Amino acid sequence: MERGTFKVKSGLAEMLKGGVIMDVTNAEQARIAEEAGAVAVMALERVPADIRAAGGVARMADPQKIKEIQAAVSIPVMAKVRIGHFVEAQILEALGVDYIDESEVLTPADPWHHIDKWRFRVPFVCGCRDLGEAARRLAEGAAMLRTKGEAGTGNVIEAVRHMRLINKQVREAQHMPEEELVEYAKELGAPLAVLQAIVEAGRLPVVNFAAGGIATPADAAMMMQLGADGVFVGSGIFKSSDPERRARAIVQAVTYYSDPQKLAEISAGLGEPMKGIAIEEIPQEQLLQTR
Amino acid sequence: MKVGVLALQGDFREHLRAVERLGAQGVEVRRPEDLKDVERLIIPGGESTAISLLLRESGLDRELRRLGRAGLPIFGTCAGLILLARELVTGRDGVEPLGLIDIAVRRNAYGRQIDSFEEDLEIAGLGALRAVFIRAPKIERLGPNVQALAYHDGVPVLAREGNILVSSFHPELTGNLSLHRYFLSLGAEREVR
């Protein structure tokens, strides 16, 4: 019996496809997410919009809170660790968390390195903005990816930017002769072996969700049409005026993403979405995606 | 042969790829009308709570119950097994099973993700198969007319009752087509709808 193999780690992400993973900060929100049809919940201390507003150092959630959320739902429970904070990851593994998000939404803990994810039995999901970042995270053992977007903004433009860029770079790499691929790997900062594997498969070798700024059913459906395998919704649900209805609507939009008629029905009468932020209004040093 | 794959959520593309590699035509099923002329149906792995909710909201639950009772061959893997079961021993958890195979099932019975595993199984009549178990459900009771086709640690993990086939593991993740081939051969003697 083999546990923690890459097949088993990436396999759970395969099961989440076509689904919505929702940020929750307590057991009550986790139950709302599960009842709305979330495929997993992300347990954290504050949603990204509140982290952005609060400033200071954002860390892994209190284990007590994670346990309460685990007890409240039967779907997978994910939780975030700071980039490079392998001890927070050890703690989450000990708690039996189903997936760890090594996330730029929290304050980075290591100025140089991400976590060596091969050393863990629990799988990791990591954010990426381009193919180079995606390839580096894969080399470190990530079993699932998500485009970063710009978390806590309710503004989908960065999620679109990252998804489109990765798609474009995969296409470009596929049409290159080997000698150009070596140079391209250097340019992207991508390990060549990972890049070659991506070219061979014609796609990223693991499931890739969209994240960071998705606030409406239309946002979610757009990311699906752009090729996302599913979506993460952070602040978009519990910062809206009617979280239950919005959560259900986004779940439906990810299933019926290519049916405009259905999307029109789903999108009607959901109340106020979260108030968004224009990316240009965010001071450069407060952008989360560059971490 | 037209094979429907329930595409509300989960790894439906892996099942579509498997049936297409066997020469069948795969069809994504999201609404009752997508079931037209479908001769086999697969319910994929995924989250049973989410799929169950979407089945009810789309009206596909009634349609699948009707077709399953009328003899349409249906294969459920992992979440699909949960959804086809008669009884859930862990309580409903928001999952309303279709009740098409007489088994009792416990969700997430093998533990959390860190307990997920893969192992070679011996399958009656089909030989060895690599099986991937992910937060897998456990069959805790088999009805008198249900036949177990494979075991892991003495627990049935592949079972069949007439036109309904279920596995607690994921044959669609391995590239081995023998179980899909076996499923497509089921009920060939009988006219559906």
Image: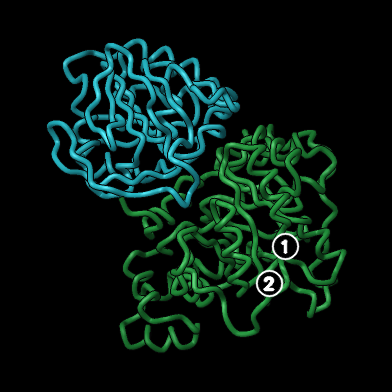
Chain colours: A green, B cyan
Write down the chain letter for disc 2. Answer: A
Q: Give me the disc on residue A289.
A: 2
Residue B156 visible, this angle: yes
Residue at the image point whose x is 34% and y is 39% from the top: B169
- Same chain under badges 2 and 1? The reply is yes
- Check contact, mark 2 vs mark 1: CB within 8 A: yes
Write down the chain letter for disc 1. Answer: A
Q: Amino acid at mark 1?
A: Ala
The percent coordinates of residue B52 (x first, y second) are 54, 27
Residue at the image point whose x is 60% and y is 69% from the top: A87
Quadrant in the picture for residue B65 = top left
Measured in 3D between alpha carbons, the distance from the residue under mark 2 to the one under mark 1, in whole angstroms, is: 8 Å
Residue A224 visible, this angle: no
How would you rate the neighbour count of disc 1 (Cα within 10 Å): few for under 14, some for 14-19, many for 20 or more? many
The percent coordinates of residue B176 (x first, y second) are 22, 46
The percent coordinates of residue A117 (x first, y second) are 49, 69
Classify residue B163 as left or right of residue A174. Answer: left
Residue under label 1:
A151
Which element carries disc 1, helix, strand or loop?
A: loop
The percent coordinates of residue B155 (x first, y second) are 31, 31
Q: Is residue B85 positioned above or below A69 on the image? A: above
Classify residue B145 as left or right of residue A20. Answer: left
Q: The C terminus of chain A is located in which quarter?
A: bottom right
Which element carries disc 2, helix, strand or loop?
A: loop
Q: Is residue B90 positioned above or below A172 on the image? A: above
Classify residue A191 as left or right of residue B187. Answer: right
Quadrant in the picture for residue A9 = bottom left
Q: Amino acid at mark 2?
A: Gln
Classify residue A45 as left or right of residue B116. Answer: right
How would you rate the neighbour count of disc 2 (Cα within 10 Å): few for under 14, some for 14-19, many for 20 or more? some
Q: Is residue B178 positioned above or below A107 on the image? A: above
Sequence-wise, which precedes: disc 2 or disc 1? 1
